[in-house]
Image (cartoon, grey):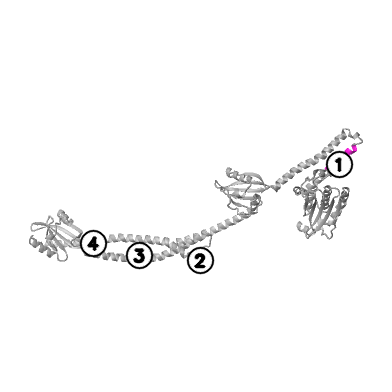
Amino acid sequence: MENRGGAMPDRTGFRFRNRLFWKIGIVYLLLFLLVMSVLDIYFVRAVKREYSEAAFSQLEYISALALNNPPSASSRPVLAEWSGRLSKGGIRLTLLTMSGEVLADSEESPSGMGNHEERPEIRDAIASGTGRALRYSTTQKRELAYLARTVELNGRKIVMRFSLPLYRLDEGVADFRKRLWGISLLIVTLAGGITLAFFRSVSDRIGRLSEFSRMVAEGNFRPMPIDLNNDELAELAGTLNETALKLDQTISTLKQERNQSAAILASMEEGVAVIDTDRRVIFCNNAFREAAGIAPMKWEGRPVVELIRHSDLLSLIQKAATDNEVVHGDVVVGSVRTRSFDVTCAPVRSSSTPAGIVMVLHDITEIRRLERVRRDFVANVSHELRTPLTAIRGFAETLLEGGLDDDTNRRGFVEIIHQHALRLSRLTDDLLRLARIEAGKLSLEFTPVAVDDIVAACVETADVKARQKGLVLEVVPVSNLPLLTGDLPSLQSVLQELLDNAIRYSSEGGRITIAAAASESEVVISVSDTGIGIPKTDQYRIFERFYRTDPARSRESGGTGLGLSIAKHLVEAHGGRIRVESAVGAGSTFYIHLPVQGAHQLLNR
């Protein structure tokens, strides 16, 4: 399909010559015919004029000879004999009266000739003395030159008309035309051949330029071969090569910028979509399709109402298009797991005319969650502080108002105040500890730690509490577990919190089981109980601060609601994770995933 050698394909050249060459050829031929016709008319008239002037000169000469040798008498026989003598040499002489009657003629009998008064040369001679005419003779069947003169012979005024046939004129004109057209055709043939060869070369060069332009239009910017001619077409070829080079560079730059822009938009976490004036989607990245719930399908060029079914998003698009200004809004999508987005719809302006809309979705789900956690934290802290402070204040006022003198109850009042003060102390300690962990200011000393050391210390403490509540604490023996790298007190506090929760939410006669397992990269410590279990809807929130599935039982047992949140942060600080599996009424199992010593070192790198 391409002609990289610079030559024009035959079909293109033929079409080009068919359109241009023949047009110029036809115009050239018409101009030639027009010029030759004008020349033919002009030269034929000139030749006729020369021949007629020569004929009239000859007739003038004959008429002068005739006047020098007039007839001896005016009778018809004498005149006939005289006219016959003068007509030798091919000239015809006719003698007429002033009224146009023929007296004598050198070739015909006067009796058979009509009146010649209306003949133009006779009429001019009668009027002025001399008359001339070039006309076709009906009797001679050819064109003749006529000269008529009035003379006086023997006292009688007559008209003497001489005529000379112009057959030589016709022969001369025909010969001239033959030579004129023959020479002209020869010149045209030679000039046309030279012009055809030259124009064929020019045609091929123009065809190559046309073919090169077509290839550039199709995206092939390979330059044409250098034209060695030093003319306008060579300059045009050089200009086209420079234009193609610059166009290739410009398109390459635009493609690179487009690919970079597409890569940037595709990799953005924010959802981006571009909608044209016909409300059709012309671009959207993966983040937008995921956020708007667009199924993996051919979306390009489809109406936005077919792809986006969320009414709030469509309303923002409509408002931005109608008001022609930037529109902001918050939209919540999803039903089971909702996601919040900050939406910006901005009109795209081309000069002063809107050319579409750009929609950007910024995921603020985590921000909204943190805002909710902050609000809940403030509310929970206020609530957690209000209860012990109210109790302390109430019993302190009771003691100040006379309770100190009540020997029976004052000790109980003081013990209640002490109990709530301890609760406040635990709460503030946990809050400070959690704040230090979240701020990254908690000092952890990482050393090689054995799983047995973590479990043994916690079991010793939890066993006493479990027996007091009538629970069975079981440790599944494991051996050859790899060492962990961590802060032993922190890991013990995590396991202790899980054991305390298991004891707190298990009923008498229940069982708590501690187990551990290892893989190549991590150790998993599990704490299982037969307690009340955790609802499915609460399982992803139990590690939030102050979140309780059973607030009453937690407060009765002295829980602050911060233990699991602290445990989660401590485990994550060790490069691990904590999760729960539970069913209501069937107990819960908490899993602590911690990297082994080598894996932890790789994580810290």
Tag in front: 4 or 1: 1
Observer-nearest of 190 and 598: 598
Q: Residue at x 52, y 59 (%)?
A: 218
Mark 2 lies on residue? 5
- Residue furthest to the right: 407
Q: CA distance from mark 1 to mark 3?
A: 129 Å
- Drawn side of residue 420 relative to residue 32, left or right: right
Cβ–Cβ below 8 Å for labels 1 and 3? no
- Drawn side of residue 442 relative to residue 232, left or right: right
Residue 581, percent from left and from top: 78, 52
Q: Which mark is residue 179?
A: none
Mark 4 lies on residue? 50
Label whose residue precedes the other's in the sequence (3 or 4): 4
Label whose residue precedes the other's in the sequence (2 or 3): 2
Task: Name the element at disc 1.
Answer: helix
Label whose residue precedes the other's in the sequence (1 or 3): 3
Magenta span: 410-424
Mark 1 lies on residue? 419
Label 4: how many Cα within 10 Å (few below 14, some 14–19, many 20+): few
Magenta stretch: includes residue 334: no
Q: CA distance from mark 4 to mark 2?
A: 63 Å
Label whose residue precedes the other's in the sequence (2 or 1): 2
Mark 3 lies on residue? 188
Task: Name the element at disc 4.
Answer: helix
Tag in front: 4 or 2: 2
- Drawn side of residue 411 relative to residue 221, left or right: right
